[in-house]
Amino acid sequence: MDRLQALTVFVAVAEAESFAQGARLSGLSAPSATRAINTLESHLGARLFTRSTRRVRLTEAGRTYLGEVREILAQLQAADDAASGAANTPVGRLRITCPQEFGRLHVTPLLTDFLDHYPQVEAELMMLDRIVNLVEEGFDIAVRIGHLPDSELTAVRIGQVRRVICGSPDYLDRWGPPRTPGELARHRLVTLAAGVPAREWHLGADASRGVSVASRLTVSSVAAAIDIARRGWGLCRVLSYQVGPDLDAGALQTVLEEHEPAPLPVNLVHVEGRRAAAKVRAFIDFAVPRLRALEVLRSEGDAERGE
C-alpha cells in the first residue's frame, strides 16, 4: 500500500474511531487497514492510536498528525481539481458546522435548496453549540456568532443578532414587565446551561453590568427555554434570531431593550480564501445574499435603509 493511501486510511479510521468502519470507508478489508496503520506507525516511530476492544482513540501525537494530514490531503485534492478542471465545478462532500438553533431555522432550508442547484455536491451539516476547529476537525465552512479572534480564516459577515430577554404577553400582564435590571430579581427566570447554570446576565452596551440571576429553572435546550417562556411561565434570555417568529407573531415580547449588550456579529468562515474549492465558493455565493436578506439578522439601520 502506498503512503498516500495509508494517510487516507489513517484519516478514515481516526474519524470513525474504528478500524472496521474506517476500512469500509476506504474500500479496504479491516486487516488491510490495520496493516496500513501499523506500517505508518513503524515508519513514524510513534503510536497514533490507543486500541481497545470497542474503539480506537487518537494519541496526542495522532491528534497533531491528523490535522497535518488533513491539510496535506486537502491541498492535494485542490491540486488535482485544478489540474482536471474540477476546481470550477462544485462537486464532492461539503462539511458545514453551525449552532443548533441557527442550523435548524436557517441553514437546513438553505442547504437543501443549494443541493437542488448543485446535484454533484453532497453535504454534511453538524449542528454544534461549540467552536469547531475547521482544520483539525475537517470542516469546510462554519457559521460563527460572536466576535472573531485573529486567525487565518476567511470571514464573510452576514448580519448581527442581539441578546434579548423576553416573555409572553400573558406573563407580562400578570407579573408586569421589569423596568430596570434590578427588577429581574422578582421575576421567574429560565436560564440556559450546558453544564454550570448561569449566575449572572451581563447587560449594558459593553456588557459590563452583571445582574445576579436567581433562576428556579435551568434547561440545556434553547428551544425548551423558549417554549417555557411562550407558555407564560417566566422570562428567558436568548439570541434575537431564535425568537424572531415569536416576536413577529406577538407570542413573545422583549423587555429591558435599552439595557441590551451590543449586537453580536454573524459570519460565515472558511479556510482557503480565494483558493477554496468550487463547492465552498459556490455555497458562500449562494448562502450569503439569502442570509443577509433575513430580517432576524439585519440591524435597525439596514431596515430603515431598505437594505
Image: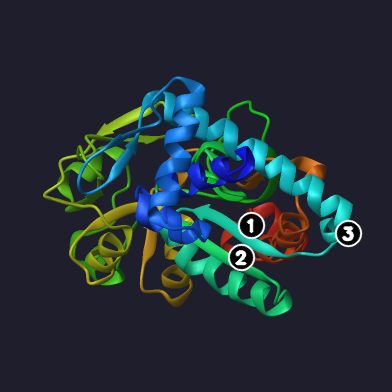
Say which element carries label 2: helix
Residue 9 placement (x, y as % from top left): 51, 47
- Is residue 66 visible in this depiction of the protein? yes
Q: Local crowd at mark 3 within 10 Å, few (<14), some, or many (≥20)? A: few
Q: In the rendered view, does 177 fall on the left or right side of 82? A: left
Disc 1 vs disc 2: Cβ atoms closer than 8 Å?
yes
Most foreground residue, 32 or 211: 32
Residue at the disc numbered 3: 85
Q: In the rendered view, does 221 fall on the left or right side of 243? A: left
Residue 299 placement (x, y as % from top left): 63, 53
Q: Is residue 74 above or below residue 224?
A: above
Say which element carries label 3: loop
Residue 200 placement (x, y as % from top left): 26, 34
**Looking at the picture, which amino acid does disc 2 mark?**
Glu
**Looking at the picture, which amino acid does disc 3 mark?**
Gly
Residue at the disc numbered 2: 295
Residue at the disc numbered 1: 298
Q: Quadrant of residue 202?
A: top left
Disc 1 vs disc 3: Cβ atoms closer than 8 Å?
no
Most foreground residue, 124 or 212: 124
Say which element carries label 1: loop
At x 32%, y 64%, the residue is 223
Q: Local crowd at mark 1 within 10 Å, few (<14), some, or many (≥20)? A: some
For the C terminus, the quadrant is bottom right
